Amino acid sequence: LEEGFAIVYNGEVGKTYGSIESFTFSPDGENFAYIAKEYAVDNQEFVVINGKEGKQYNTISELNADANGNFSYYVGGDDKYSNKIQVINENESHSDPSFFNYTKSPNGKSYSYQIREKDKRHVVYVDKNGIEHRGKDYLDSISFTWSPSGDHFFYIVHSGENGNTYIVVDGVEQGHYENVYRYLFKWNSNENAFAYKVESDKSGITVVMNGKEVGNFSVYDSVSDLVVSPDGGVVVYSVHKQNERGLNVFINEVKSPLQYDNFSGFVYSPDSKTLAY
C-alpha cells in the first residue's frame, strides 16, 4: 500500500490520501462521503462522495448529510462567522453570505441554518417536505431545536431593540421579553402543543402555553417540571415562591390547594384525563 490513509468500505481498500477526516453516511445509508487532503498538491482538501473526488479547496469544514442523501459543507473562512461558501454536493452557493449553526432534526429529515447577507441575518429551516422557510432579520438567533419527529422547529432570537428576546415556533413569534437569561421549552408527546418558560430580570418568570401566557411569577420564585398534556390542552408545572416553605402545582393558571415539601415529576394518562405525580 502507498503510505497515507485510505477508507476501507465493505472490505475494499480505497485510494490513499495524505489525510482523511469527517467520514459520514447519509441517513438512509445509501451515500458515503469524507474530507480528504493531498499534501503533494499544495495541501488542498476536497470531499469524496461515493468514491468521486470533488473540487479542491484550501479548507473544508462541517460536512453533513441531509435526508435526501445530499452532502453540504463549507469552504473558506477561519471560523463560522467568517465569509464562506456553502457547497451542496458539487454546487457552490452564494459567495458572499456566511452560513453557520447548521442543525439537523433527530430523524435527519429536516435541517436549519443561519445565513448572514451583508448586514442582515436570517434563520432558514427546511422541513421534511423540502420546503424552505426563511425568518426575519434579527440581531442574533440561538438554541435551534427540532421536535423529535422533525415536524416542528423552535429557536430564540434577539432583536437588539431594548434587549428584546422572542421565542419563535414554526416561524411565528411568541411575544417578546426583555433581558431573558434562562428558558425552558417543551413539546408534548403528540407534538400538537408546546409550552415554555422564560426568566427575565425585568418581568420575572413567565409561563406560556401554546402562545398564551398562563403564569407570571417573581424573579425570586422557582418554576420547574413543565409537562404538556397529550391532548395539548394544559401545561402542568411546579412553583416554589420565595416566602413560602412548600411547592404548589399549577395547571395552566389554576393553583393546587395543597403545598408539598417535595415531589418527583408529572405523568399524564394517554387520554389526558388523569394526572399523577
Image: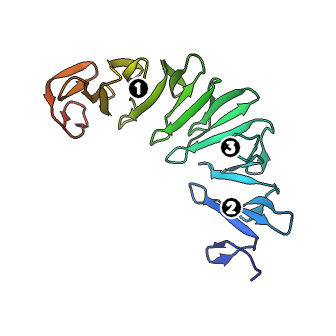
Q: Which mark is residue 199?
A: 1
Q: Which residue does the image show at 80% across and 66% down from the upper left? A: 38
Disc 1 residue type (three-letter)? Glu
Q: Earlier in the sequence, mark 1 or mark 3?
A: 3
Left or right: 4, with 128 as reference point: right
Q: CA distance from mark 2 to mark 1?
A: 42 Å
Horizontal placement of 126 versus 86: left or right? left
Q: Quadrant of residue 230?
A: top left
Viewer can see residue 79: yes
Local SS, label 3: loop
Mark 3 Cα within 10 Å, few/some/many (few <14, many 20+)? some
Name the quarter where the C terminus is drawn.
top left
| Neighbourhood count class around disc 1 (C-alpha, 10 Å): few under 14, some 14–19, many 20 upward | many
Task: Specify the quadrant of the image occupied by residue 245.
Answer: top left
Q: Position of residue 242 (x, y in %)?
A: 26, 24
Which residue position holds label 2?
Answer: 34
What residue do we see at 57% from left, 25% from top? 158
Residue receiving disc 3: 80
